[in-house]
Amino acid sequence: MTEDERNARARIVAAALVLFAERGPDAVSLRDVAAAADVSQPLISHHFGSREGLRAAVDDHVTAAFDHLLDMSTEELAAPSGGTASGFVEALLAGLPPGSAVPAYLRRMLLSGEPAGRALFRRWYDVSLDLLQRLEAAGVARTTADPAMRAAFLLANDLAVILLRDPLADVLGDDPLSADGLHRWADDAMDAYTRGVFREESE
């Protein structure tokens, strides 16, 4: 594949990612993608075969980008001074450029019920469980009798800012995926995780 072909393919995937995230893959035609990428529709068919082939390529692109960010975030948070799982989503999304379509596309993948979305969720869960166990071993996190459930709980909190982004923005007056919103979310999550929410009777 020539450099021009690689560049054209990358433009097509980038354009499809934005459109799929905004409207959903089923509402986007190859003609829409061709116009957004400034290429011909036959060129898309040449590279990807069909809309389903293009969607699979976008899934692969987002999954690869997500895996890279996930690996970087895990290493950062597992370090002795790195923090706890409450900052996982902040560390993860901080690696994305402002206005990235990846969070919206991740939401669609995770809620689709399709194999790519289920595999992504499993990957995130496995990494969350591994991170929790490493933090417990380092004495940073409290041990739990049910680490699987604890990891699922932490993951659900991480996913909330992605899956519930719009209604959270409505009630908070702040986009939870903006830089300020992520800091605000992570700060309060950290406080809740470390100090607790409810008072002891003795207090």
Image (spheres, helix red, strand yellow):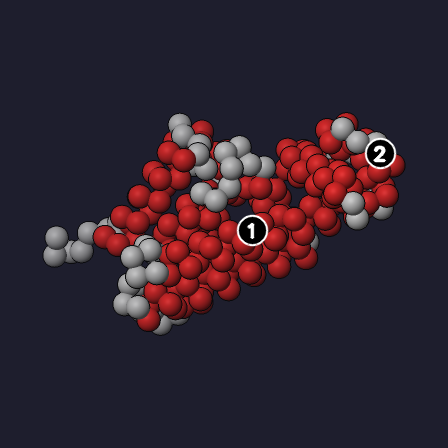
Residue 151 visible to the viewer: no
- Horizontally, is 189 left or right of 45 in the view? left
Disc number at residue 24?
A: none
Give the SS element for disc 1. Answer: helix
Q: x, y percentage for residue 30? A: 80, 35
Pointer 2: what residue? 41
Task: Give me the residue at 27% from left, 67% from top.
Answer: 139
- Depth order, front residue of 68/16: 68
Q: Are marks 2 and 1 in contact (CB under 8 Å)?
A: no
Disc number at residue 66?
A: 1
> Quadrant location of residue 155?
bottom left
Task: Give me the residue at 30% from left, 49% from top.
Answer: 190
Task: Give me the residue at 51% from left, 64% from top.
Answer: 126
Q: CA distance from mark 2 to mark 1?
A: 28 Å
- Depth order, front residue of 85/45: 45
Label 1 crowd bin: few (<14), some (14–19), many (20+), radius 10 Å: many
Give the SS element for disc 2. Answer: helix
Q: Amino acid at mark 2?
A: Gln
Q: Earlier in the sequence, mark 2 or mark 1?
A: 2
Q: x, y percentage for residue 97? A: 51, 37
Q: Amino acid at mark 1?
A: Phe
Q: x, y percentage for residue 119? A: 62, 59
Furthest residue in direction front, as rendered: 3
Task: Give me the residue at 30% from left, 68% from top.
Answer: 138
> Quadrant location of residue 170?
top left
Q: x, y percentage for residue 181? A: 39, 35
Residue 114 visible to the viewer: yes
Does residue 1 sit above or below 134 in this rendering?
above
Label 2 crowd bin: few (<14), some (14–19), many (20+), radius 10 Å: some
Furthest residue in direction left, as rendered: 202
Does residue 72 sit above or below 90 in this rendering?
below
